[in-house]
Amino acid sequence: MCGIFGLIGELEQARALHCLDTLAHRGPDGHGLWQQPGITLGHRRLAILDLSDNGHQPMADPSGRYVIVFNGEIYNFIEIRQELEKKGYRFKSDSDTEVVIAAFIEWGEACQLRFNGMWAFAIWDTREKSLFLSRDRFGKKPLFYAWLPEAKFAFASEMKAIFPLLDEVRANTSLVRDTSRIFQYESTDECVIEGIKRFPAGHSGWLKNGRLEIKRWWCTLDHLPSIPAKYEDQVEQFRELFLDACRLRMRSDVPLGTALSGGLDSSATISAMAHIARHGKTQRMGESWQHAFVASFPGTPLDETKYARMVTDHLGIDATVIEIDPLKAIADMDRYFYLFEDLYITSPIPFMLTYGAVKAHGTSVTLDGHGADELFAGYNFDFIIALKDAGWNLKQAYDIVSTHYDGLPAGSRQFAKMPSRSRFIAEYHARRMARKILRRGSQQVCKDFRHHAWRGLDHLNRQLYISTHETILPTLLRNYDRYSMANGVEIRMPFMDHRIVALAFSLPWTAKVRGRFSKAIVRDAMAPYMPHEVTYRKTKIGFNSPIVDWMKGPLKGFMLDTIASHSFKECQLIDSADVANQIQRVINNPDAKMSEGERAWTMLNPYLWERAVVKRENFT
């Protein structure tokens, strides 16, 4: 896990090192620079596998023809290495990087289909003077590129590594100003900085003779497996895959941990790790996996420490509780935004502080629960669309709405009151019929809607497919890459194993919303390893910022000082008067809702982003 940088064209060494050093947070354990006429490859290292110098990058194959810079992890590298050794390949390191370059030599582009992992890598062919770029199936690891004057081509793990090569760093104004697109642009090539593009997830490309040709190598709909008809057998199939996904991701030469929220997904992950560790079912397992890090928000509706402790007590391990105090982070706000680079709907503070604490406690790898909500219907706004699948089956419809209602936090004025269940169902179908009469679709059009397998998906799975591949999950994968790598921490995501993703879209909606529970198959599969109260807990908030509480309390001064500042009032990326009014309404309204706090922060975002990323005024 690292940061990579490269340039096709001439580049003086000092400037190359300057670009590379902007990624030092991603790779605090060392750096490497390889240059020949017309090509520069750079690497910042976070040592996870093979901590010796044998894992140093840029790395060349024994012949010297191919040179690679690689960011990510190939979890099944041991199995691939064994297969290559039978073909006569010999390895001098214990790293997955050496396996990647050998696999590329043996199988060419087809090597990507053999990898179970997350990655962005570049391989330079010194003989053909060509560059091969690849990004993992779902875009867990970032990759940006830019065309520069004199036909130069640059690529990097973060946009900031390309900044020193631009004549001017300018905001992509139309994108930054339109906060409604925050969950829309990560699955496109459009970036918040003019002149920089995002290399697409699940794609690879060749740069030859000044031309970049990109093609898609992965579509989940091409890989849907057969599933058993009985739900109980589906549960068993998922359980087997999930435990194996965790087993592979426990391969590490440094300690492992988990960012434990007390919710189902992270609790399932650490419970699976405990089961695997007890039964000794993995090779190269990290020297310790019992590091549970719990973010605490005392006195707010978002505090879930109680549930996290239930899990650690059940497993017999200690929990490191990290009390998130935003006052400790205000001075670092500009640095956080600079490291984050992009736009989002909530404050980076709790995430940056959590993974900073993870690193401070000597842990460089976490296995976290990201992806389960999008794959298995954990969000109320997603799974409610299953009402279309239930149709006029009133029992199924009532169970779906009850699942929705039961998941809403009780006892907090920050969440809106809901109508009766029967009224909710009636109003939903009334709106649906009205849209049908007016011929207005209620769902987004998926990029893969012409695929033959798309027609076989039910309404819920179509919605989840879009959330997974185009909107919510690509955004969250980007976010957690930034939060963790800003602190030199690698996040591994068992739910994002490509076998589990493919399985998820082979399952019917009834395996996901079932018996008045969301993510039913995950709960039923992992119940043997978890405390019952956590496994079948219905309320869901998610790891977020208690933004309303903070705006009224510890961040009130920061918010008021910000909207009173001259630079805020002069910012061209926002309507400063409108933003100020929204912030004041949240601060002054004792019944302000969570959604209103998020809206206020979202509206403020472009100003804070411009100050930190484009102007870089308050730090060096």
Image (tube, rainbow, N blue to C red):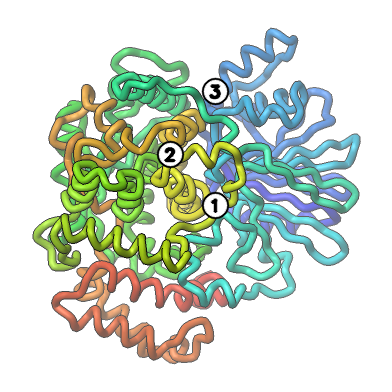
Tell me the residue that label 1 is attached to: 446
**Marks 1/2: CA–CA distance:** 36 Å
The image shows residue 503 at horizontal and vertical percentages of 45, 30
At 86% from the left and 37% from the top, the residue drawn is 126
In which quadrant of the rendered image does the N terminus lie? top right
Image height check: is 492 above or below 13? above
Q: Is residue 320 visible?
A: no
Image height check: is 334 above or below 153? below
Q: Is residue 281 left or right of residue 448?
A: left
In which quadrant of the rendered image does the C terminus lie? bottom right
The image shows residue 321 at horizontal and vertical percentages of 22, 46
Q: In the structure shown, which secondary structural element does the residue marked by tag 3 occupy?
A: loop
Q: Quadrant of residue 220?
A: top right
Tell me the residue that label 3 is attached to: 76
Tell me the residue that label 2 is attached to: 364
**First in residue order: circle 1 vs circle 2:** 2
Kind of residue indicated by mark 1: Cys
